[in-house]
Image (spheres, helix red, strand yellow):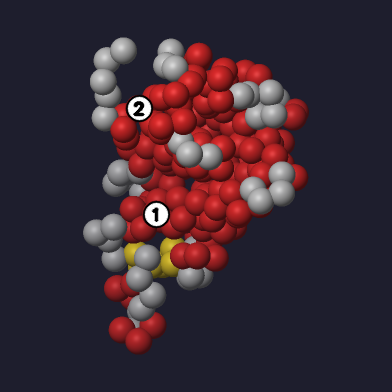
Amino acid sequence: MARMPLAQRRRQLTEAAIRAMARDGVPRTTTRSIAAEAGVSLSVFHYCFDSKQALLESVIETITEHYLAVVKEEIRPRATLLETVRAGFRAYWDHVRAHPAEHMLTYELTQYALREPGFEHLARRQHELYCATYAELLEQVGAGTEFGLRVPVPVLARYLAAMTDGLTLNFLVLGDAAAAAEILDMVAEQVAGLVHDERLLPSSGRRPL
């Protein structure tokens, strides 16, 4: 077996865990099955992760990184702010439609963490990460501009995290992609409507994005 840096090996095992859990479910996925999925020995798994909690936290963070990367790539200056916001939402939605099992896994991880004694903090970590992700994206939208928000970034970030979480579950249950796309367009317009041009405000009224 080729020697691999620890961080790279952890990433390999995390991606293998995501595939195995998305296919078989969280309760039925074992450390042995993850090691087999990654093509490594069980001892390599235990060298990389000292607990199941550490593995699940890595899984949660990595799934979020998957769609954050594609959204960040799309959030670049466009003709209008609305187009920029829409591009970000559509990039997220394209990821949901392309990887439904991975997004379904996020809900299973939440329920598993809430039901398993001692794992509750992972569910909190998961949703805190969603909010932090939206805050980062909002900062990116406003970077280098004269725009600001009419509401605090943490409030809007929590709203967007709750909205996309519910909308994604709605799509996974009902399968109505057209209806979901319409809702995302509506939310994009709402977000654009919460933005103001700070050049028109007195300095005391500035609230940077």
Q: Residues within 10 Å of mark 2 (few under 14, many from 20)?
A: some
Residue 132 placed where, x, y %?
46, 55
Q: Quadrant of residue 201?
A: bottom left
The residue type indicated by label 1 comes to Glu
- Asked if 190 appears above or below 54 in the picture, the reply is below
Residue 108 placed where, x, y %?
68, 35
Q: Earlier in the sequence, mark 2 or mark 1?
A: 2
Q: Can you identify the residue that label 2 sits on? A: 9
The residue type indicated by label 2 comes to Arg
- Asked if 187 appears above or below 180 in the picture, the reply is below
The answer to whether any part of residue 138 appears in the image is yes
Q: Quadrant of residue 142?
A: bottom left
Tell whether 153 sits left or right of 79: right
Quarter of the picture containing the N terminus is top left
Residue 75 placed where, x, y %?
35, 43
Badge number at residue 113: none
Tell whether 136 sits left or right of 188: left
The mark total stands at 2
Task: Report the Cα–Cα distance between label 2 and label 1.
Answer: 27 Å
Q: Can you identify the residue that label 1 sits on? A: 136
The answer to whether any part of residue 186 appears in the image is no
Tell whether 12 sits left or right of 109: left
